[in-house]
Image (cartoon, rainbow, N blue to C red):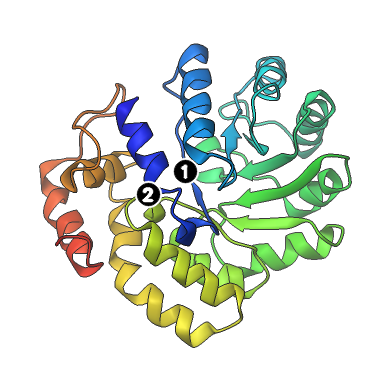
Amino acid sequence: MEGADRLAHRKRHPRSRRRRHNGRIATLSESELRELTERACAAACGRIAIIAGAGSSSTAVTVARVQWLSGLPIDALLVVTPAYNRPTQEGLYRHFAAIAEAADKPLILYNVPSRTAVDMLPETTGRLAKLPGVIGIKEAVPGAERVRQILASSPAGFVVLSGDDATALEAILAGARGVVSVTANVAPGAMAKMVAAALAGDGPRAAQLDAPLRKLHQALFLEANPIPVKWALAELGRIGRGIRLPLTELSEAYRPQVRAALQEAGLFG
């Protein structure tokens, strides 16, 4: 919990205003999720948005979770597609429709097929975007084309956030409004500057700012996220060592690559 507090205070810096935090709730109990969310809200002091992760593989469990999370001073809910079940597109629509009806906070959808084994297609996202309270999506399918497809299927004002650091720049230039970033956990200022340049339409400047981060984008996924990023944060002295099972610490073979990527990004010093 102390490590989470330190990270939350680092992200309160004004330069981080366009960058979101990537959390992990899969290994948290409900009481731990509540405590972490409350601590994040206290650390934010109203200066940055708090978006609470609320998804699970069960519609009923997710509905119950969003109901109690809605009672906290958060700004929005982030709900991932249900993992393992592999629902149809109609099942995904009904799942999120039930959650949107139960939620008392704005809802951001989250599509990450590499983790859930189901891809919510742009047409389904567009249907959901028409529901009251559904304000955006974190889209982890990489690249600009998926962003364009979602925007074409959705009402004006619907927000697309990239969920893939390596292609966030091209996604933003295609119309995404930001990125829910893993890299920003270790390099919040650098990512915020890159995103700001991209949002301003300055592609060359954004690419220049992104260049020192390219190896880091890749290195933080050498093993399953959040294994590398937690190891990197510990290496930088920002959190303690250790990770909860079934995850294990970063393999020795990958540590030199992560260190080199941190060095190239200018994070040692």
Q: Which residue of the protein is positioned furthest toward the front in this rendering?
A: 45
**Considering only vertical position in the picture, is 189 above or below 186?**
below
Packing grade of label 1 (10 A; few <14, some 14-19, many >=20) is some
* Nearest to N terminus: mark 1 or mark 2: 1
The amino acid type, in three-letter code, at marker 2 is Asn
Res 133 quadrant in image: top right
Along the line of sight, the residue nearer the viewer: 47 or 119: 47
Along the line of sight, the residue nearer the viewer: 33 or 8: 8
Circle 1 sits in a helix, a strand or a loop, which is it? loop
Q: Name the residue under label 2.
A: 185
**Mark drawn on residue 41:** none
Circle 2 sits in a helix, a strand or a loop, which is it? helix
Q: Which residue is drawn at 39% across and 82% down?
A: 208
Q: Which residue is drawn at 77% across and 63% down?
A: 151
- Report whether 244 appears left or right of 133: left
Q: In which quarter of the image is the N terminus?
A: top left
Q: Which residue of the protein is positioned furthest toward the bottom in this rendering?
A: 204
The amino acid type, in three-letter code, at marker 1 is Asn
- Report whether 108 appears left or right of 43: right
- Report whether 104 appears left or right of 30: right
- Report whether 69 appears left or right of 91: left
Give how far across and how far down residue 55 sits, in percent. Answer: 61, 28
Q: Mark 1 points at which residue?
A: 22
Packing grade of label 2 (10 A; few <14, some 14-19, many >=20) is many
Q: Mark yes or no: residue 225 visible.
A: no
Label total for image: 2
Give how far across and how far down residue 130 sits, in percent. Answer: 89, 47
Along the line of sight, the residue nearer the viewer: 48 or 263: 48
Q: Mark 1 touching mark 2, by CB under 8 A?
A: yes
Give how far across and how far down residue 102 sits, in percent. Answer: 80, 23
Q: Quadrant of the C terminus?
A: bottom left
